[in-house]
Image (cartoon, rainbow, N blue to C red):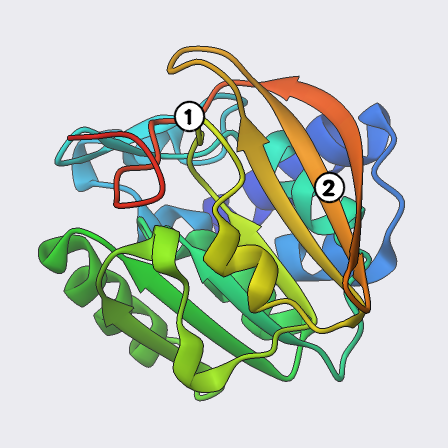
């Protein structure tokens, strides 16, 4: 007999993702597998699979499942990819990425969130993830270039270090860009020294704080 969270997870995938047009089989399977309730505060356990963001402390949120799914599907992830995530937050998207791609590198500005995410990911046995605390707007140059970079906070502009750390062979950067309280998801594709920018869905994320982002 399935536990209540497994049932809620299946309902979330069917009603919030598939019904709204999410088709990427790898993304869907990752959402079915990763226990979102482990990444929310205990006070919100009963809301873990609902169709909205939830607070995780320190002014941050775990994003709406559908918005996470959009970003992962638009990223066109492949099993061999190395992905840089900016804004570990709860670690939920990190865990989804770990199910889909070969290597995940994640940068979180807030040490307490980074440590909490690391503990949950370790408990799930995700060994293909590295997390560090730092300024995500500067990326993580040590392991560049990346096939994909996914930013989970809204930026006033596209940070140059992130563009530079993309693979020149079709690397993609997904980043919400715009004012503090309303952004558009940008998809930046690098080919050599050229960058193509496509504007996708409207979205609302917490501000991307850092040297190449907003001031705190």
Please name the residue shown 27% across and 62% down the image: 117
Quadrant containing the N terminus is: bottom right
How far apart, in angstroms, are the residues tagged by discs 2 and 1? 22 Å
Q: Which residue is mark 2?
A: 187
* In this rendering, position of residue 47 left or right of residue 171: left
Q: Based on the displayed image, in which of its 4 quarters is residue 202 positioned? A: top right
Q: Residue at x 49, y 34 (%)?
A: 49
Question: Which is nearer the eye, 157 or 82?
Answer: 157
Q: Position of residue 48 (x, y in %)?
A: 40, 35
Residue mark closest to the camera, 2 vs 1: 2
Compared with 128, 22 (above or below) is above
Are the two marked residues, 2 and 1, in contact with CB atoms closer than 8 angstroms?
no
Q: Is residue 200 visible?
A: yes
Q: Position of residue 44 (x, y in %)?
A: 26, 31
Q: Which quadrant of the structure image shows residue 59?
A: top left
Q: Position of residue 32 (x, y in %)?
A: 65, 55
Identity of the residue furthest to the bottom in this view: 127
First in residue order: circle 2 vs circle 1 = 1
Along the viewing direction, whichever of 199 and 64 lies nearer the viewer: 199
Residue 98 placement, left or right of 202: left
Count all numbered tags in the image, as a single digit: 2
Q: Taking 40 as reference, is 95 left or right? A: right
Tell me the residue at 75%/84% (across/down). Answer: 80
Q: Label 1: which residue? A: 53
Element type where label 2 sits in the image = strand
């Amino acid at each position: 007999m399935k536990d209540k969270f497994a049932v809620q997870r299946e309902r979330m995938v069917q009603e919030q993702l598939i019904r709204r047009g999410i088709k990427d089989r790898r993304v869907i399977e990752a959402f079915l597998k990763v226990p979102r309730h482990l990444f929310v505060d205990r006070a919100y356990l009963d809301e873990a699979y609902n169709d909205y963001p939830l607070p995780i402390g320190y002014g941050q949120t775990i994003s709406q499942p559908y918005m996470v799914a959009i970003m992962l599907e638009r990223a066109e992830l492949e099993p061999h990819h190395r992905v840089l995530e900016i804004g570990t937050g709860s670690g939920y998207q990190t865990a989804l990425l770990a199910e889909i791609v070969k290597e995940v590198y994640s940068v979180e500005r807030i040490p307490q969130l980074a440590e909490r995410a690391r503990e949950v990911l370790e408990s799930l046995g995700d060994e293909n993830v590295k997390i560090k605390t730092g300024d995500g707007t500067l990326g993580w140059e040590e392991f560049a270039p990346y096939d994909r970079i996914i930013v989970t906070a809204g930026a006033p502009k596209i940070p140059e270090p992130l563009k530079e750390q993309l693979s020149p062979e079709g690397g993609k950067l997904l980043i919400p860009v715009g004012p503090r309280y309303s952004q558009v998801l940008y998809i930046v594709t690098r080919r050599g020294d050229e960058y193509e920018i496509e504007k996708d869905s409207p979205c609302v994320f917490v501000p991307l704080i850092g040297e190449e982002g907003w001031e705190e």
